[in-house]
Image (cartoon, rainbow, N blue to C red):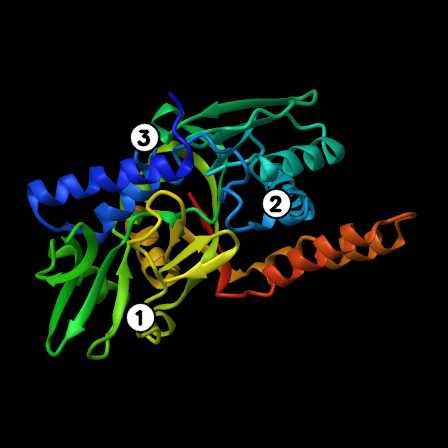
Amino acid sequence: MTLDLPERSEVLRQRIADEIRADGPVSFARFMERALYEPGLGYYMSQRPVTSRRGDFLTAPETHPAFGALLAEGAREYADVLNVPEFTVLEQGSGSGALARSFIKRWSETTQRSLRYVMVDFHTSGIPAPPGVTIITASSLDEVDPFEGLFLSNELPDAFPVHRVRRRGAAIVEVYVGLHDGDFIEIEGQPSSPELEEWLDAAGIVLADGAEIEVNLQVEPWMRRIWELLARGRVITIDYGFESDRVSRFPRGTLLAHYRHTTNEDYLQRVGEQDLTAHVCWTALEEIARRTGLRIVERVTQREYLSRLGWKEWGMRLLRTPFVTEAELESFDRLGSLAEGMGGNGVLVLDK
């Protein structure tokens, strides 16, 4: 029998509650992992192929196809430099396929070079492959062979489960999720791992008394897996994030819940029904990339990156297009608003 959304949410809530009753309070990272990725029940794991953010948060590729098309322009130029027999693009977190669709369309229109496009997500949407393009789908990076080309992700690390830590006087404490009268509550306790404070030190983050920040321990193993898979090529990570000095200015951290195009801080409610994200700390991500062996090429705002690839020219062509609709222009303008760097939207480019 197929459960509707509220029923799935209740089943998941009960499962997490049972774990807490059996083993005690869990880290917020564990709670977030189950809320987003519990098989068949988590926010990303249930069969609801609406958009990559399930209709609760509109991403840039879903706003206007110019986003994927401009990334294809940059990839085509890089493919000419790399000059491999078969250029591969691996997109992790492909979701609805919006980015892949516009990327492949533009690639096919502008080059004869063959392309192997690998879409990695829990639920991949099938898209047609034009001549010269091979499309491969996988549910995880474990199903992918080493390749030469481009590793691409858009708004992926911000959805990795995070630990929440706070400063209390001279000490760092961790925020756990416990139970009280059947409801989830926050409980402070000793850090679950010395890696949490080591991460803060490496990122150069100094918290004020009472301030909170998220610690993403999953970025390093993820980056190491990318290094293993990428025989030679480039890594482009597009996401919301800040440098460590700006991250530490948020007294309540950057964690947000996204539900039906609204944001809230009720992280423990609507389990499995709402998205949970935390901004990336670019300082920590760059340090991890260096340790992994990847070379930092640049980090720029999304607007700067897209402008370099022909953003303004695309807009001018659109304005000159006969019978262009108001809706088309509005969607292009919305993409421009996203590219302005709202919330620290940036692009990190790495090489191996």
Residue at (81% x, 54% y) in the render: 326
In the image, residue 216 sits, relative to residue 78, either above or below, namely: below
N-terminal label among 1 and 3: 3
Nearest to the observer: residue 331 or residue 303: 331
Label 3 secondary element: loop
The image quarter containing residue 98 is top right
Please state which amino acid type lies under the numbered disc 2: Glu
Please give the residue where the numbered disc 2 appears in the rendered image: 62
N-terminal label among 2 and 1: 2
Residue 237 rendering spot, x and y as whole percentages: 47, 49
Residue 286 rendering spot, x and y as whole percentages: 36, 57
Residue 309: numbered disc: none
Q: Is residue 307 visible in the rendered structure shown here?
A: no
Q: How many residues crowd mark 3 within 10 Å: few (<14), some (14–19), many (20+)?
A: some
Please state which amino acid type lies under the numbered disc 3: Pro
Please give the residue where the numbered disc 3 appears in the rendered image: 39
Give the tally of numbered discs: 3
In the image, residue 310 sits, relative to residue 165, either above or below, namely: above
Q: CA distance from mark 2 to mark 1?
A: 30 Å
Label 1 secondary element: loop
Please give the residue where the numbered disc 1 appears in the rendered image: 252
Please state which amino acid type lies under the numbered disc 1: Arg
